[in-house]
Amino acid sequence: MDIIFLMISVSIVIAIIFFVLFIKSVKSGQYDDLYTPSVRMLFEDEFINDESKIKETKSINQITNK
């Protein structure tokens, strides 16, 4: 009978520890956005190409304005 009280108390302590760690991770923002990181790698090349096009148009505009 003593082992049951020991097991219940140990399981409650472990549950409290996991609950505190969960609350800490939620407050730190770990679960804010789950969708964007999974698709970010699909659009990374387009962002690089867009930035290079912007740089090209800026350089063309600078040449034509001189």
Image: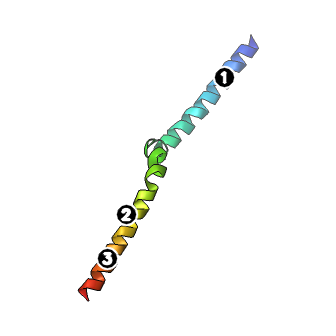
Q: Nearer the viewer, residue 41 or 4?
A: 41
Which amino acid, by three-letter code, is at mark 3? Lys
Image quadrant containing the C terminus: bottom left
Give the residue displayed 58% in from the left and 30% down from the top. 16
Q: Which residue is mark 3?
A: 58
- Is disc 3 placed on a helix, strand or loop? helix
User: Between disc 1 and disc 3, whose residue precedes?
Assistant: 1
Q: Quadrant of residue 55?
A: bottom left
Q: Is residue 60 above or below residue 51?
A: below
Q: Which residue is mark 2?
A: 50
Give the residue displayed 66% in from the left and 19% down from the top. 8
The answer to whether marks 1 and 2 mark residues whose Cβ atoms lie closer than 8 Å is no
Q: How is the image coloured?
A: rainbow
Q: Nearer the viewer, residue 33 or 2?
A: 33
* CA–CA distance in space, label 2 to label 3: 12 Å
Q: Is residue 12 above or below residue 5?
A: below
Q: Nearer the viewer, residue 65 or 22?
A: 65
Q: Which mark is on residue 9?
A: 1
* CA–CA distance in space, label 1 to label 3: 68 Å
